[in-house]
Image: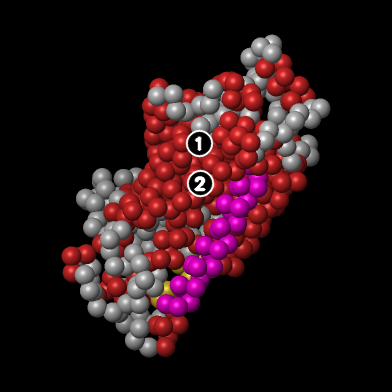
Amino acid sequence: MVDGLEALTVIFTEFYYWMTVVLMFLIHVGFCVYEVGASRRKNLQHTLMKNTMLIPLVTITFFYFGWWIYFAFPLWPFLGDFSPAAWALPWSELMGTHLGGAVTVQTDSLTVDDTAFWARINGVFWAAFLLFSWTTASIVSGAVIERIKTQAFLILAVLVGSVTWIIDAAWGWSWNGWMVQLMGYHDAYASSVVHGIAGGSALGILVVLGPRLGKFAADGTPRDFPQNNPWLVTTGLFLIFTGFWGFYAACNIPIIDFNGAVLGIADAEPYFTATNIYLTPTSLSAITFNFLMSLSGGLLAGYMLSRGNPFWSYSGGLAGIITASAGNDLYHPIEALIVAMVGVWFAYKLHYWVERKFKIDDAVGAVAVHGYAGFIGTVIAGFLLWGYPSNVASVDNLGWFGNTAEGVAMINPLGQFIGAIIMFWILGFIPCWIVAKILASLGWLRVPREIELAGLDTHDYGDAFPYFPYRDTATENMDRELARGQGD
C-alpha cells in the first residue's frame, strides 16, 4: 500500500466485509432455530443436522469452484467466453494468506494489479458470498423438512449453494453481467438473485418430494401442523432479521473513489462514496431507511392478512424486506413500505392457492416468503425504477430493449420480468426438479413411510437421540391414525 489514505481504505474495506460475515452468520443461526421450532419433536435432530452439515459441504465446494464461477460466467454466453479469474482458482496464491506484493507463482496468470487489489479483500469478499450461499441453501432446507433424506438434501444444497445461485449472481448481480448489460437487470439486495432462485429450487424439489404424510385429508383439504415451539420460531425469525442487516451491508462496496476508480476519469476530483453491487452510488443511510420501512410494511401486511397469526406476521416481515430488496438502493422509504405490503399480499395469497391447487406441502412457507415475494419484488422494481441506470457502465452494451444511455442499460419492466423468470424457473426450479427426479428414481430422495411415521430422529440417531413420547395434540393423534393405516 502506497500511502496512508490507501492503507486506511483497504483495511477499512477488509474489516467492513469481515463484520458483514459475522452478522450474516446470524441468518444461519436463525434458520436452524426457526426450523427446529417448526418441526415436530420426532424430527428435531434430523432437521437441525441437515441444516448444519450444509455448512462444511457448501463451504468446501464454494472454495473449489463456486467463487470462480462468479468471476468466470458474467459475459457467457451472450457477451463473451468464460473469464480466467486467476485470483479465484482454488490453487491461486490469493486463495489463502496474502499481504500483497509481487506475484510469486507465475502459473496462476496473476498480475501485480491482481495481488494489489485482491490480497486483503479476497478472503472476506469470498466469505460474504459464501454466507449468501449458505442462506440460499438454508431457504430450501425449511421447505422440505420431516421427509427428505439427509444425503439427498446435501446433494441439492451443493447444487444450489455452489452452482446455480452463483451462476445467477454472475449473470445478474455483477456490474458487467450480461443480464445487466443487455436487459438492464437490477436487483441490488437480491430479491431474485438469492431469494427467488431459492424459492424456485424449493418448489422444484417439493413437486417431486411430495407432501408429508397426513398433510392433506382424503378430500384434499390441507391440514396445519402445529409448531413444536412457537418461541423458537419467533427467535429464529428475529435472528434472521438481525442477520439481514449484514446481508444488506455485504451487498455494498463500502468506500470507493467513484469519479476516479469507477468512472476512470484520471483528472476528476475524488468523490468517495459507497456503491451497490453494480457500482452505482448509495449509502448505508439509504438502505437503513428502506430496510426498516419494508420490514414494518411486511409485518403489518402479514398481521392483517393472517388476522394476527404469529407465524405469518413474522414471515410477512421477512417477505416484505425480500420484496423491496431489488430496488431498496433507490426507493423512497414510503415506496419501500408500499412495495413490501404488496409483496406480502401476493406471497400469502399465492401460497394457499398453490397448496390447495397442486397439493404442495411447503412446511415453512419458504417458496412463498422467498420465491413468490422475490419474484414480484423484482418485477415491481422494473416499473418503479424504469429509466434509472442499471449499472455504472457497460463493456459492450447491445441494448436488447432499446433502453440505453451513454453505454448503460436502463432498468425496465421487461428486463426485470425476464430476469425474474431466469432466476425462479430456469436456474431455480428446473435444475432442482431434474436432480430430485434422479434422486427419487434411485430411492435416495424420501425416507420410507414407516420411518417418517416413527420419526426421522429415531431412524438416524437411535438411542443417542430417543424419540419423544406423544403429546395430546391433534397432529400427534393424526399420526396415530396414520400408523394404524386409517389415513393417507
Stretch of the chain drawn in magenta:
10-35
Where residue 291 appears, as percent x and y from the top left, is 62, 57
Whether residues under marks 2 and 1 lie with C-beta atoms below 8 angstroms apart, the answer is yes
Residue 18 shown in magenta: yes
Mark 2–mark 1 distance (CA, rounded to whole Å): 9 Å
| Residue at 57% in and 20% down | 449
Number of labels in the image equals 2
| Residue at 40% in and 83% down | 6
**Camera-nearest residue between 128 and 179:** 128
Identify the amino acid type marked 2. Met
Occupied quadrant, residue 312 = top right
Where residue 370 appears, as percent x and y from the top left, is 56, 42
Occupied quadrant, residue 472 = top right
Q: Measured along the vertical axis of the image, is residue 217 above or below residue 293?
A: above
Please give the label number shown on residue 150: 1
Q: Secondary structure at mark 1?
A: helix
| Residue at 72% in and 19% down | 480
Dot 1 alpha-carbon crowd within 10 angstroms: few under 14, some 14 to 19, many 20 or more:
many
Where residue 338 appears, as percent x and y from the top left, is 64, 48
Identify the amino acid type marked 1. Thr
**Residue 223 visible, this orientation:** yes
Where residue 81 appears, as percent x and y from the top left, is 21, 50
> Which residue appears farthest toward the right when viewing the image?
472
Mark 2 or 1 closer to N-term?
A: 2
Residue 465 shown left or right of residue 102 in the figure: right
| Residue at 73% in and 37% down | 228
Report which residue position mark 2 lands on: 53
> Which residue appears farthest toward the bottom when viewing the image?
3
For the C terminus, the image quarter is top right
